[in-house]
Amino acid sequence: MSPNEIITALRQVRYPGTGEDIVSAGMVEDDIRIQGYRVSFSIIFKKDNDPFRKSLLKAAEAAIKTYVNRDAEVVIHEKTPSAVAPEETWQSPNIFHHIIAVSSGKGGVGKSTVTSNIAVSLAVAGYRVGLLDADIFGPSQPRMFGIEGYQPVAEEVGGRQLIVPAEQYGVKMLSIGFFVSADNAIVWRGAMASNAIKQLVNDALWGELDYLLIDLPPGTSDIHLTIVQTLKLSGAIVVTTPQPVALIDARRGVDMFRNDKIDVPVLGIIENMSWFTPAELPENKYYIFGKDGGKALAEELNVPLLGQIPLVQSVREGADNGKPVALLQGHPAAEQYRKIAEKLKD
């Protein structure tokens, strides 16, 4: 190991408030020491209550282990001004009236597309809406909202620096995708990912929201437990396709929320890609993934079926182009999302 290797690795770590790597930002002091497998250096924080401190320290350690030597013993010294004010003096500006987690037992069922369109439908209806992209290892909401280039900034509130969410189509949104390169894999342990989620919740300037939607990772993981422990959820939605393989995992997803240790109300199941309707034959339905599988599962588990979303090309195009289909007046899928939003308000 050499100091140059350490510096090169630390250039992969970006400060979330500016997007600049911590070396170029002058946050890495020129005091790198290497003794065998032990590496020590200092990171300079401009403020002693920096909201990104914990995640940045973990990201710096991970960078050394990933790009230099996985067996390295990393010691990071923090250099900050005066001590942080007592936590009990802090008054959070955030008020969440309803917090709804959107989950799926497996990937590829359109959970993120469903979440973005529900959020837009609620915003179109006049509600104050936020969306937290908690899918740490596959953040897609920046693309779906057409704001991949957003650079989060921090705003001081009550003596603390809070991350300002992006806002598009009337929806406030934060995603780990704003803080990492789209070309790089996110190689984090569960604890690091959980800390990042906590910061996006607690150290962000969400303000007062009628609805905060959370786009969870597929499956069950540390992230799900972190969300449940950090926020008091109003309920959860499980997204599936009618395909039997997807239904197996959707069943597990419902069971997870009903577990005694989690105990979150399941607001319902959304069956996505229920049938294929070609644009030139709008009255035709082709049940590519099976018919009414999500509907049958909802009946079996005694949970509401919130809606059946057709598989149409414009839904996919809207997600890829950053313009959710829920923005289109009169579109069949948009109408389905509007009805789902209405049910969530009941």
Image (tube, rainbow, N blue to C red):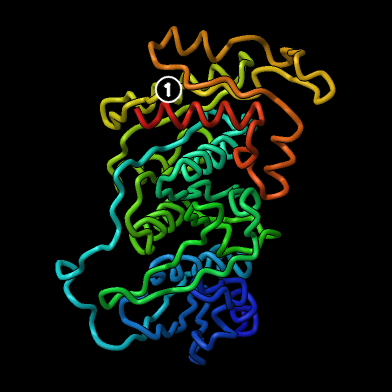
Please report the residue visible at 52 percent of the width from the left and 21 percent of the height from the top: 307
Residue furthest toward the front? 330
Under tag 1, what secondary structure? Answer: strand
Residue furthest toward the bottom? 30
Establish if 321 lies above or below 336: below
User: Residue 39 location, x and y as percent?
Assistant: 49, 78
Please report the residue visible at 64 percent of the width from the left and 31 percent of the height from the top: 330
Near mark 1 (Cα within 10 A), the count class, few <14, some 14-19 or many ≥20, is many
Closer-to-camera residue (281/303):
281
User: Residue 165 location, x and y as percent?
Assistant: 47, 62
Closer-to-camera residue (259/191):
259
Please report the residue visible at 53 percent of the width from the left and 88 percent of the height from the top: 26
User: Residue 146 location, x and y as percent?
Assistant: 65, 55
User: Residue 78 location, x and y as percent?
Assistant: 37, 81
Closer-to-camera residue (59/236):
236
Which quadrant of the view contains residue 205? bottom left
The type of residue carrying mark 1 is Gly
- Left or right: where 126 falls relative to 334: left
Which quadrant of the view contains residue 235? top left
The residue under label 1 is 268
Residue furthest toward the right? 280
